[in-house]
């Protein structure tokens, strides 16, 4: 990332009136939670295409719950990193209207972000596929897999698996927000999962700008991004936010 690009991003943020952040798994890798793409660890052993698909979950819940149990163990230990904290600080100063996240790890909220749209749901709750009762993940034993409801039904995390629709009210809210947005900070997403990846296009259609932060180029970088800040989110976002706040 060049100094000039950082300065351009500071100016764009200062000039914008409705800033949103769209975040993906890359913002949480430095908290120890591996992203699907370009990562090692968990997803080398569990192919996300298979394990994160609703048809696999329904076909073999015990197998998919084995992966989920490991993922929950990792998420439980994870702490927000300086990138999550920088976004919370920007919101606290009234310069960020909210975060739309594809993550299910709850780290934005734990860093202090108040307005978070969880586009792909949350790892914090489980739902019974038979009676619809909702449980806190923490309060359910994962000793015997898959976990079940007292009614005997299968429990499923309230996260959106591949092959499942986004809950309509979440979809509406996110797209209504994108309609108001004149600058979207797109952080740590490969922009390959739809419809989340459609949101930055919506912003640009209406004349808004995209400031993208990623370790590597994505399909958005050349096609859409106004400014591309190449590098780690936990290093770039605190610098960017500090400069915006000191330049007010
Ligand atoms: P992805 O795995 O497809 O892509 C991650 C992106 O982040 C890549 O472009 C990578 O270059 C970038 N990246 C990695 N580390 C980075 C860093 N330190 N700084 C900046 N950029 C970094 O993630 P996605 O686009 O969010 O899509 C995958 C889906 O997987 C999402 O729907 C999400 O729900 C789910 N997921 C969530 C979590 C989580 O909750 N933490 C973890 C894994 C996957």
Image: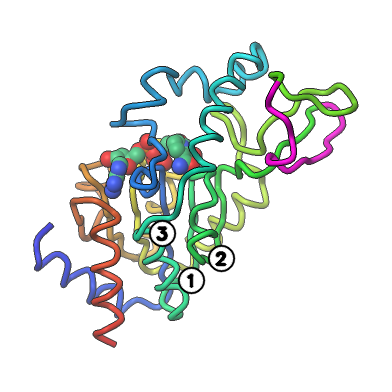
Residues drawn in magenta = 130-143
- Which label number is shown at residue 97? 1
Image quadrant of ligand 1 equals top left
Q: Nearer the viewer, residue 209 or 53?
A: 53
Residue 95 as seen in the image, left or right of residue 222:
right
Query: Residue 211's image quarter?
Result: bottom left
Q: Nearer the viewer, mark 2 or mark 3?
A: 3
Give the mark, 3 or 1, whose residue is nearer the N terminus: 3
Which residue is rendered at x = 41% and y = 77% of the image? 95
- Tag 3 near tag 1, CB within 8 Å: no
- Tag 1 near tag 2, CB within 8 Å: yes
Percent x, y of residue 72:
56, 35
Q: Is mark 2 within 8 Å of ligand 1?
A: no
- Which label number is shown at residue 84? 3
Which residue is rendered at x = 40% and y = 24% of the image? 43
Taking 208 as reference, is 225 above or below it? above
- Which label number is shown at residue 75? none
Query: Residue 241's image quarter?
Result: bottom left
Q: Is residue 179 magenta?
A: no
Percent x, y of residue 111:
48, 62
Q: Is residue 132 magenta?
A: yes
Percent x, y of residue 120:
56, 42
- Which label number is shown at residue 115? 2
Q: Nearer the viewer, residue 218 or 223?
A: 218
Gap between marks 1 and 2 measured at Cα: 7 Å
Residue 178 as seen in the image, left or right of residue 150:
left
Element marked by disc 1: loop
Position of the C terminus, as image quadrant, is: bottom left
């Amino acid at each position: 990332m060049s100094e000039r690009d950082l300065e351009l991003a500071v100016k764009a943020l200062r000039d914008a009136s409705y800033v949103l952040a769209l975040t993906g798994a890359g913002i949480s890798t430095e908290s120890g939670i591996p992203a699907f793409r370009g990562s090692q660890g968990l997803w080398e052993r569990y192919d996300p295409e298979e394990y994160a698909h609703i048809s696999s979950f329904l076909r073999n819940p015990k197998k998919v719950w084995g992966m989920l149990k490991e993922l929950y163990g990792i998420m439980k230990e994870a702490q927000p990193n300086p990138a999550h904290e920088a976004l919370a600080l920007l919101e606290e100063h009234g310069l960020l209207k909210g975060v739309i996240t594809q993550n299910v790890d709850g780290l934005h909220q734990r860093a202090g972000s108040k307005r978070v749209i969880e586009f792909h749901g949350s790892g914090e709750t489980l739902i019974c596929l038979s009676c619809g009762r909702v449980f806190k993940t923490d309060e359910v034993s994962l000793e015997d897999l898959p976990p079940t409801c007292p009614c005997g039904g299968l429990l499923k995390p309230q996260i959106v698996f591949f092959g499942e629709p986004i809950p309509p009210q979440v979809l509406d809210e996110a797209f209504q927000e994108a309609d108001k947005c004149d600058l979207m900070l797109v952080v740590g997403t490969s922009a390959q999962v739809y419809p989340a990846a459609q949101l930055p296009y919506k912003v640009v259609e209406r004349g808004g700008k995209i400031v993208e932060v990623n370790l590597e180029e994505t399909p958005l970088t050349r096609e859409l991004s106004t400014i591309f800040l190449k590098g780690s989110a936990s290093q770039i976002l605190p610098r960017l936010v500090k400069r915006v706040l000191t330049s007010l």
